[in-house]
Image (tube, grey):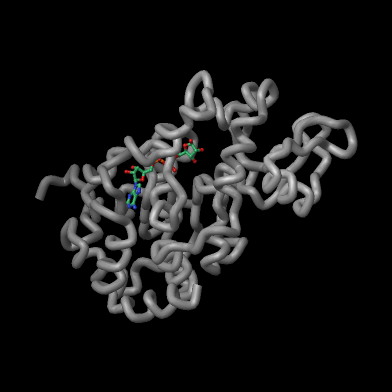
Amino acid sequence: VDESTPPRTLSGRTLEALAEYIKSGKASKIVVMTGAGISTSAGIPDFRSPETGLYANLARLNLPYAEAVFDISYFRENPEPFYALAHELYPGKYRPTVTHSFIRLLQDKGLLLKLFTQNIDCLEREAGVSDDKIIEAHGSFARQSCIDCSQPYPEENIKEHIDKREIPRCHHCKGLVKPEIVFFGEQLPAAFFQSRTLPMQADLCIVMGTSLTVQPFASLPGMTREETPRVLINKERVGGIGSGSDDVLILGDCDDGVRKLAEACGWLEELEALWATT
Ligand code: APR
């Protein structure tokens, strides 16, 4: 045996080998990393898919470039496009997917160490993943505040403004109010930096529905130990996952992927029952 290759954790890079590992009880500290791809089947577009992605459909907002809609300096100049988009994206209209329920199932089985999500739709919370298990790396619509004086802004007012497509202004200093979504040019929440070494403690890493193109989130899968298996459940290969000696690729729709994995673990009925109540 070539000494330089580390001993393999899985008996193969297959879904069956992965399920065997999970059923053995050796995967009890699972970190999950997710992006917009896990919410597309709920009706929320992702960002970069060619036809359906948000960035391909913002032409009507005549932005200088698509990501300007989430750029803090552009927002200061012109908050209209973001608020037009917020009207479409605001939580409460969408149901979690079976992929969100799969994460909840891992939690209920005591196997979820932490979920790192880039999503701002709060669907993980709605699926029943508890607050202490979630790191919303790019913030969320859960809170909003003034971008000048940081004064918190009451949620009920912002809902009203978003419904009426009006731009909410700070009651205190008349500054622009913005949901605490991390815009390009803004710092990620402290909670992200406090938890970013957690993947080193994980004994399994599951990455789902993300292009892994935005840093520093995209560096998370690389924080795992060499011997920690990493699973990619995604339409396409991303982030170099698949080259590691214990990487498993479950390519295709993530709802199908989590159902396949749940079935191999003997959890499919439980998963469907959980999702049916969500
Ligand atoms: N099943 C599996 N994979 C899917 C599905 C699906 N139903 N739908 C989309 N995908 C995949 C796409 O192929 C792509 O690889 O999910 C990924 C989505 O990538 P992005 O659209 O780039 O979304 P995300 O990775 O979350 O973007 C990261 O970019 O604009 C910023 O802050 C924003 O958090 C966002 C960040």
Q: Where residue 121 appears, x then y in whole percent?
A: 55, 52
Q: Is residue 137 left or right of residue 59?
A: right
Residue at (76, 41) in percent of width and height: 145
Ligand 1 resides in the quarter of the picture at top left
Q: Where residue 207 appears, x then y in whole percent?
A: 37, 51
Image height of 116 relative to 47, above or below: below
Q: Which residue, as the protein is rendered here, is positioned at the far right?
A: 172
Number of numbered markers: 0
Residue at (64, 37) in percent of width and height: 83
Pick the front one: 123 or 197: 123
Residue at (49, 77) in percent of width and height: 277
Q: Is residue 180 visible?
A: yes
Pick the front one: 31 or 140: 140
Image height of 185 relative to 151, above or below: above
Q: Quadrant of residue 28?
A: bottom left
Q: Quadrant of residue 86?
A: top right
Q: Where residue 127 appears, x then y in whole percent?
A: 52, 67
Q: Which residue, as the protein is rendered here, is positioned at the far left?
A: 1
Q: Is residue 200 visible?
A: no
Q: Where residue 111 appears, x then y in whole percent?
A: 44, 69
Pick the front one: 203 or 62: 62
Residue at (57, 32) in percent of width and height: 70
Q: Is residue 16 left or right of residue 39?
A: left
